[in-house]
Protein backbone atom coordinates (compact mmCIF):
# COMPACT_ATOMS: atom_id res chain seq x y z
CA UNK A 1 0.00 0.00 0.00
CA UNK A 2 1.26 3.48 -0.81
CA UNK A 3 2.43 5.56 2.13
CA UNK A 4 0.43 8.79 2.09
CA UNK A 5 2.49 11.81 3.08
CA UNK A 6 1.58 15.34 4.19
CA UNK A 7 4.31 18.00 4.18
CA UNK A 8 4.27 20.98 6.49
CA UNK A 9 6.83 23.30 4.95
CA UNK A 10 7.94 23.28 1.33
CA UNK A 11 11.32 24.97 1.73
CA UNK A 12 14.80 23.50 1.46
CA UNK A 13 14.05 20.21 3.22
CA UNK A 14 10.48 19.80 1.89
CA UNK A 15 11.62 20.22 -1.69
CA UNK A 16 14.65 18.03 -0.99
CA UNK A 17 12.60 15.02 0.14
CA UNK A 18 10.23 15.45 -2.84
CA UNK A 19 13.17 15.41 -5.27
CA UNK A 20 14.69 12.36 -3.60
CA UNK A 21 11.43 10.39 -3.66
CA UNK A 22 10.69 11.31 -7.28
CA UNK A 23 14.23 10.48 -8.44
CA UNK A 24 14.45 7.19 -6.54
CA UNK A 25 10.86 6.05 -7.08
CA UNK A 26 11.74 2.91 -9.07
CA UNK A 27 14.68 1.98 -6.83
CA UNK A 28 12.61 2.31 -3.65
CA UNK A 29 9.81 0.19 -5.12
CA UNK A 30 12.21 -2.48 -6.33
CA UNK A 31 14.43 -2.61 -3.24
CA UNK A 32 11.99 -1.98 -0.39
CA UNK A 33 8.54 -2.41 -1.97
CA UNK A 34 8.06 1.22 -0.93
CA UNK A 35 5.55 3.39 -2.73
CA UNK A 36 4.36 6.84 -1.75
CA UNK A 37 1.83 9.53 -2.55
CA UNK A 38 1.97 13.16 -1.40
CA UNK A 39 -1.58 14.14 -0.44
CA UNK A 40 -1.17 17.48 1.36
CA UNK A 41 1.34 20.32 1.46
CA UNK A 42 1.13 23.52 3.50
CA UNK A 43 3.67 26.29 3.17
CA UNK A 44 3.37 29.89 4.34
CA UNK A 45 4.87 31.21 1.09
CA UNK A 46 3.34 28.90 -1.52
CA UNK A 47 -0.07 28.11 0.02
CA UNK A 48 -1.94 24.99 1.13
CA UNK A 49 -3.05 22.15 -1.13
CA UNK A 50 -4.86 18.86 -0.56
CA UNK A 51 -5.84 16.01 -2.84
CA UNK A 52 -6.62 12.68 -1.15
CA UNK A 53 -5.75 10.92 -4.41
CA UNK A 54 -2.33 12.53 -4.79
CA UNK A 55 -0.79 15.90 -5.68
CA UNK A 56 1.15 16.86 -8.78
CA UNK A 57 4.51 17.30 -7.00
CA UNK A 58 6.68 17.91 -10.13
CA UNK A 59 4.43 20.86 -11.07
CA UNK A 60 4.56 22.17 -7.49
CA UNK A 61 8.37 21.97 -7.47
CA UNK A 62 8.44 24.03 -10.66
CA UNK A 63 6.10 26.61 -9.16
CA UNK A 64 8.23 26.80 -6.00
CA UNK A 65 11.45 27.21 -8.01
CA UNK A 66 9.83 30.07 -9.94
CA UNK A 67 8.77 31.55 -6.54
CA UNK A 68 5.10 31.28 -7.61
CA UNK A 69 2.21 30.23 -5.40
CA UNK A 70 0.62 26.81 -5.88
CA UNK A 71 -2.21 26.80 -8.44
CA UNK A 72 -3.77 23.30 -8.17
CA UNK A 73 -5.72 21.46 -5.43
CA UNK A 74 -5.89 24.57 -3.25
CA UNK A 75 -7.52 24.29 0.18
CA UNK A 76 -8.59 26.92 2.69
CA UNK A 77 -8.05 24.59 5.67
CA UNK A 78 -5.65 25.97 8.27
CA UNK A 79 -2.59 23.83 9.05
CA UNK A 80 -4.00 22.06 12.11
CA UNK A 81 -7.33 21.29 10.38
CA UNK A 82 -5.48 20.07 7.29
CA UNK A 83 -3.28 17.77 9.40
CA UNK A 84 -6.28 16.43 11.31
CA UNK A 85 -8.63 15.96 8.34
CA UNK A 86 -6.30 14.79 5.57
CA UNK A 87 -5.88 11.10 4.75
CA UNK A 88 -2.07 11.06 5.27
CA UNK A 89 -0.40 8.22 7.20
CA UNK A 90 2.67 10.35 7.93
CA UNK A 91 3.06 14.08 8.51
CA UNK A 92 6.53 15.49 7.80
CA UNK A 93 6.99 18.60 9.94
CA UNK A 94 9.55 20.66 8.01
CA UNK A 95 8.69 24.22 8.94
CA UNK A 96 11.30 26.65 10.29
CA UNK A 97 12.78 25.91 13.70
CA UNK A 98 11.83 28.20 16.58
CA UNK A 99 13.88 27.20 19.60
CA UNK A 100 12.23 29.80 21.86
CA UNK A 101 8.63 28.57 21.68
CA UNK A 102 8.74 25.54 19.38
CA UNK A 103 5.78 27.03 17.50
CA UNK A 104 4.04 26.36 15.22
CA UNK A 105 5.71 22.95 14.87
CA UNK A 106 4.62 21.71 18.31
CA UNK A 107 0.95 22.32 17.43
CA UNK A 108 1.45 20.55 14.09
CA UNK A 109 3.07 17.54 15.76
CA UNK A 110 0.38 17.33 18.43
CA UNK A 111 -2.42 17.51 15.82
CA UNK A 112 -0.79 14.75 13.78
CA UNK A 113 -0.14 12.43 16.71
CA UNK A 114 -3.62 13.03 18.19
CA UNK A 115 -5.13 11.97 14.85
CA UNK A 116 -2.91 8.84 14.80
CA UNK A 117 -0.53 9.98 12.08
CA UNK A 118 3.21 9.33 12.36
CA UNK A 119 5.49 12.35 12.63
CA UNK A 120 8.81 12.63 10.80
CA UNK A 121 10.59 15.88 11.51
CA UNK A 122 13.85 17.77 11.04
CA UNK A 123 12.47 20.61 13.15
CA UNK A 124 14.50 20.91 16.34
CA UNK A 125 11.78 22.83 18.22
CA UNK A 126 9.49 19.94 19.28
CA UNK A 127 12.43 17.57 19.85
CA UNK A 128 14.54 20.01 21.90
CA UNK A 129 11.70 21.57 23.90
CA UNK A 130 9.03 18.83 24.25
CA UNK A 131 10.46 15.42 23.43
CA UNK A 132 9.02 13.46 26.40
CA UNK A 133 5.52 14.83 25.77
CA UNK A 134 5.64 14.09 22.03
CA UNK A 135 7.04 10.59 22.52
CA UNK A 136 4.44 9.77 25.17
CA UNK A 137 1.62 10.98 22.92
CA UNK A 138 2.99 8.98 19.97
CA UNK A 139 3.24 5.83 22.13
CA UNK A 140 -0.30 6.34 23.44
CA UNK A 141 -1.67 6.66 19.91
CA UNK A 142 0.38 3.76 18.52
CA UNK A 143 2.35 5.88 16.03
CA UNK A 144 5.96 7.07 15.72
CA UNK A 145 7.70 10.36 16.49
CA UNK A 146 10.82 10.22 14.28
CA UNK A 147 13.56 12.86 14.57
CA UNK A 148 16.68 11.66 12.74
CA UNK A 149 16.84 14.95 10.82
CA UNK A 150 17.06 17.11 13.93
CA UNK A 151 20.73 16.27 14.56
CA UNK A 152 23.42 16.38 11.82
CA UNK A 153 20.99 16.19 8.86
CA UNK A 154 20.83 12.68 7.37
CA UNK A 155 24.06 11.44 8.93
CA UNK A 156 22.71 8.75 11.27
CA UNK A 157 23.00 9.86 14.87
CA UNK A 158 19.67 9.06 16.52
CA UNK A 159 19.35 5.82 14.56
CA UNK A 160 22.98 4.93 15.32
CA UNK A 161 22.44 5.25 19.04
CA UNK A 162 19.07 3.49 19.05
CA UNK A 163 20.21 0.79 16.61
CA UNK A 164 23.85 -0.30 16.14
CA UNK A 165 25.09 1.23 19.43
CA UNK A 166 22.17 -0.08 21.53
CA UNK A 167 23.57 -1.76 24.64
CA UNK A 168 26.56 0.58 24.91
CA UNK A 169 26.44 3.13 27.72
CA UNK A 170 27.52 6.49 26.41
CA UNK A 171 29.34 8.78 28.82
CA UNK A 172 30.32 11.59 26.47
CA UNK A 173 29.39 13.03 23.08
CA UNK A 174 31.59 15.72 21.61
CA UNK A 175 31.99 17.23 18.20
CA UNK A 176 31.02 19.62 15.44
CA UNK A 177 27.24 19.91 15.36
CA UNK A 178 26.57 22.85 13.06
CA UNK A 179 27.31 22.79 9.33
CA UNK A 180 26.89 26.50 8.66
CA UNK A 181 29.48 27.66 11.18
CA UNK A 182 31.95 24.93 10.23
CA UNK A 183 31.59 25.97 6.59
CA UNK A 184 32.04 29.63 7.54
CA UNK A 185 35.14 29.00 9.65
CA UNK A 186 36.62 26.86 6.84
CA UNK A 187 36.04 29.54 4.20
CA UNK A 188 37.18 32.39 6.46
CA UNK A 189 40.47 30.55 6.88
CA UNK A 190 40.83 30.73 3.07
CA UNK A 191 40.28 34.48 3.22
CA UNK A 192 36.54 35.02 2.69
CA UNK A 193 34.83 37.71 4.83
CA UNK A 194 32.25 36.86 7.53
CA UNK A 195 29.19 38.48 5.85
CA UNK A 196 30.09 37.17 2.41
CA UNK A 197 30.53 33.59 3.57
CA UNK A 198 27.31 33.67 5.64
CA UNK A 199 25.40 34.69 2.50
CA UNK A 200 26.92 31.74 0.59
CA UNK A 201 25.95 29.36 3.43
CA UNK A 202 22.38 30.65 3.19
CA UNK A 203 22.32 30.25 -0.61
CA UNK A 204 23.58 26.67 -0.25
CA UNK A 205 20.67 25.85 2.09
CA UNK A 206 22.89 25.21 5.12
CA UNK A 207 21.76 28.06 7.36
CA UNK A 208 18.60 28.26 9.46
CA UNK A 209 15.77 30.57 8.31
CA UNK A 210 17.21 32.99 10.85
CA UNK A 211 20.99 32.42 10.59
CA UNK A 212 21.50 33.95 14.05
CA UNK A 213 20.51 30.47 15.22
CA UNK A 214 23.67 29.11 13.61
CA UNK A 215 26.25 31.80 14.32
CA UNK A 216 25.14 32.40 17.93
CA UNK A 217 25.36 28.65 18.61
CA UNK A 218 21.63 28.19 19.35
CA UNK A 219 21.20 25.50 16.67
CA UNK A 220 24.08 23.48 18.15
CA UNK A 221 22.63 24.06 21.63
CA UNK A 222 19.29 22.59 20.46
CA UNK A 223 21.15 19.51 19.21
CA UNK A 224 23.13 19.20 22.46
CA UNK A 225 19.81 19.28 24.36
CA UNK A 226 18.27 16.63 22.10
CA UNK A 227 21.32 14.37 22.52
CA UNK A 228 21.41 14.86 26.30
CA UNK A 229 17.73 14.00 26.69
CA UNK A 230 17.40 11.24 24.14
CA UNK A 231 20.78 9.54 24.24
CA UNK A 232 21.61 10.06 27.92
CA UNK A 233 18.10 10.22 29.37
CA UNK A 234 18.62 13.67 30.91
CA UNK A 235 15.88 16.21 31.59
CA UNK A 236 17.92 19.11 30.28
CA UNK A 237 16.27 22.43 29.41
CA UNK A 238 17.74 24.21 26.43
CA UNK A 239 18.40 27.42 28.39
CA UNK A 240 20.49 25.51 30.93
CA UNK A 241 23.15 24.81 28.29
CA UNK A 242 25.96 27.43 28.30
CA UNK A 243 26.31 28.63 24.73
CA UNK A 244 28.73 30.82 22.80
CA UNK A 245 28.73 31.08 19.02
CA UNK A 246 31.28 32.27 16.46
CA UNK A 247 30.20 35.90 16.12
CA UNK A 248 33.20 37.20 18.03
CA UNK A 249 35.77 35.22 16.03
CA UNK A 250 37.65 37.61 13.77
CA UNK A 251 39.93 37.04 10.79
CA UNK A 252 42.80 37.93 13.16
CA UNK A 253 41.74 35.13 15.56
CA UNK A 254 41.70 32.71 12.64
CA UNK A 255 45.16 33.82 11.55
CA UNK A 256 46.48 33.54 15.13
CA UNK A 257 45.19 29.96 15.34
CA UNK A 258 46.85 29.16 12.00
CA UNK A 259 50.15 30.55 13.28
CA UNK A 260 50.04 28.09 16.20
CA UNK A 261 49.07 25.08 14.08
CA UNK A 262 45.48 25.16 15.29
CA UNK A 263 42.00 25.84 13.92
CA UNK A 264 38.76 27.20 15.43
CA UNK A 265 35.80 24.84 15.64
CA UNK A 266 32.39 25.31 17.26
CA UNK A 267 32.25 22.36 19.62
CA UNK A 268 29.16 20.87 21.30
CA UNK A 269 29.61 18.57 24.29
CA UNK A 270 27.32 16.41 26.41
CA UNK A 271 28.88 14.60 29.34
CA UNK A 272 27.67 12.25 32.05
CA UNK A 273 29.92 12.48 35.12
CA UNK A 274 28.72 10.14 37.85
CA UNK A 275 25.10 10.64 36.84
CA UNK A 276 25.33 14.42 36.45
CA UNK A 277 24.67 15.30 32.81
CA UNK A 278 25.92 18.61 31.46
CA UNK A 279 26.05 20.20 28.02
CA UNK A 280 27.85 23.12 26.40
CA UNK A 281 28.53 24.85 23.10
CA UNK A 282 31.55 27.06 22.50
CA UNK A 283 34.29 27.79 19.96
CA UNK A 284 37.53 25.98 20.71
CA UNK A 285 40.98 26.22 19.20
CA UNK A 286 41.78 22.66 18.14
CA UNK A 287 45.32 21.50 17.41
CA UNK A 288 45.75 20.47 13.76
CA UNK A 289 46.81 16.99 14.85
CA UNK A 290 43.34 16.37 16.38
CA UNK A 291 40.88 14.47 14.12
CA UNK A 292 38.18 17.16 14.50
CA UNK A 293 40.55 19.78 13.05
CA UNK A 294 40.43 18.07 9.66
CA UNK A 295 36.63 18.19 9.42
CA UNK A 296 35.95 21.06 7.01
CA UNK A 297 33.01 22.67 5.24
CA UNK A 298 29.40 21.79 6.14
CA UNK A 299 30.59 18.40 7.38
CA UNK A 300 29.87 17.47 11.00
CA UNK A 301 31.61 14.93 13.24
CA UNK A 302 30.63 13.42 16.56
CA UNK A 303 32.60 11.16 18.87
CA UNK A 304 30.64 8.92 21.25
CA UNK A 305 32.62 7.68 24.26
CA UNK A 306 31.15 4.29 25.14
CA UNK A 307 31.80 1.62 27.78
CA UNK A 308 32.02 -1.34 25.38
CA UNK A 309 33.67 0.13 22.28
CA UNK A 310 35.67 3.09 23.56
CA UNK A 311 35.38 6.01 21.15
CA UNK A 312 33.14 5.71 18.09
CA UNK A 313 33.25 8.63 15.64
CA UNK A 314 30.85 9.37 12.84
CA UNK A 315 31.58 12.00 10.20
CA UNK A 316 29.06 13.16 7.60
CA UNK A 317 27.08 16.00 6.07
CA UNK A 318 25.47 18.25 8.67
CA UNK A 319 23.24 20.38 6.49
CA UNK A 320 21.86 20.79 2.98
CA UNK A 321 18.81 20.17 0.85
CA UNK A 322 19.40 16.55 -0.19
CA UNK A 323 21.43 15.67 2.93
CA UNK A 324 18.59 16.69 5.26
CA UNK A 325 16.01 15.35 2.79
CA UNK A 326 17.69 11.97 3.25
CA UNK A 327 16.98 12.07 7.00
CA UNK A 328 13.29 12.25 6.15
CA UNK A 329 13.62 9.37 3.69
CA UNK A 330 15.32 7.11 6.23
CA UNK A 331 12.56 7.74 8.80
CA UNK A 332 9.80 7.23 6.18
CA UNK A 333 11.40 3.90 5.24
CA UNK A 334 11.62 2.85 8.89
CA UNK A 335 7.91 3.51 9.31
CA UNK A 336 7.21 1.56 6.12
CA UNK A 337 9.45 -1.35 7.19
CA UNK A 338 7.83 -1.58 10.60
CA UNK A 339 4.34 -1.79 9.17
CA UNK A 340 4.64 -4.16 6.23
CA UNK A 341 6.06 -7.45 5.04
CA UNK A 342 8.76 -5.89 2.89
CA UNK A 343 11.30 -7.52 0.65
N1 LIG B 1 21.55 25.17 10.03
C1 LIG B 1 21.88 23.85 10.43
C2 LIG B 1 23.38 23.63 10.27
C3 LIG B 1 21.11 22.88 9.60
O1 LIG B 1 24.02 24.47 9.61
O2 LIG B 1 23.92 22.68 10.80
C4 LIG B 1 21.05 21.51 10.15
O3 LIG B 1 20.50 21.49 11.44
Image (spheres, grey):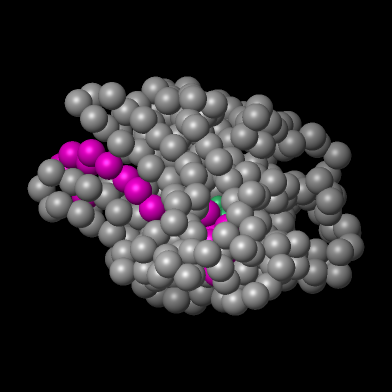
Residue at 70% in and 51% down: 211
**Residue visible at 36% across and 63% down?**
287
Q: Does 178 sit left or right of 280 as displayed? A: right
- Counting from the top left corner in percent of width and height, residue 296 is at 48, 70
Q: Residue at x 64, y 49 (%)?
A: 248
* Residue 80 point in image, percent of width and height: 71, 31
Query: Where in the image, quadrant-wise, is ligand 1 located?
Result: bottom right
Q: Nearer the viewer, residue 249 or 73?
A: 249
- Residue 167 among those drawn in magenta: yes
Tell me if residue 2 is in the magenta stretch.
no
- Which residue is depicted at the point 58% across and 28% down? 110
Q: Which residues are magenta?
A: 165-186
Q: Give 325 or 138, whichever is nearer the viewer.
A: 325
Is residue 218 rendered to the left or right of residue 95? left
Q: Is residue 107 above or below residue 321?
A: above
Q: Is residue 26 visible?
A: yes
Q: Quadrant of the C terminus?
A: bottom left
* Front-lying residue, 110 or 76: 110
Please indicate, yes or no, whether residue 177 appears anywhere in the rendered image.
no
Q: Position of residue 134 (x, y in %)?
A: 49, 28
Q: Nearer the viewer, residue 90 or 228?
A: 228
Q: Is residue 81 above or below residue 329?
A: above
* Rendering quarter of residue 11: bottom right
Amino acid sequence: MKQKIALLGFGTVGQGICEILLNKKEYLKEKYNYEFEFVAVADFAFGSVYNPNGLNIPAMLEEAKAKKKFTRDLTTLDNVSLITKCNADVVCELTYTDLDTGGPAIEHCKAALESKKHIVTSNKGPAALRYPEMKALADKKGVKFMIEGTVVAGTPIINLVEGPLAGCEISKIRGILNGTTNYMLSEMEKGMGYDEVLKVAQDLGYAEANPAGDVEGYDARGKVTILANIVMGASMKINEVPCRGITKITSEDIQKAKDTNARWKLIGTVENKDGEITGSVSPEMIDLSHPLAGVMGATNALTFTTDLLGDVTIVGPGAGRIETGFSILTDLLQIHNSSCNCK
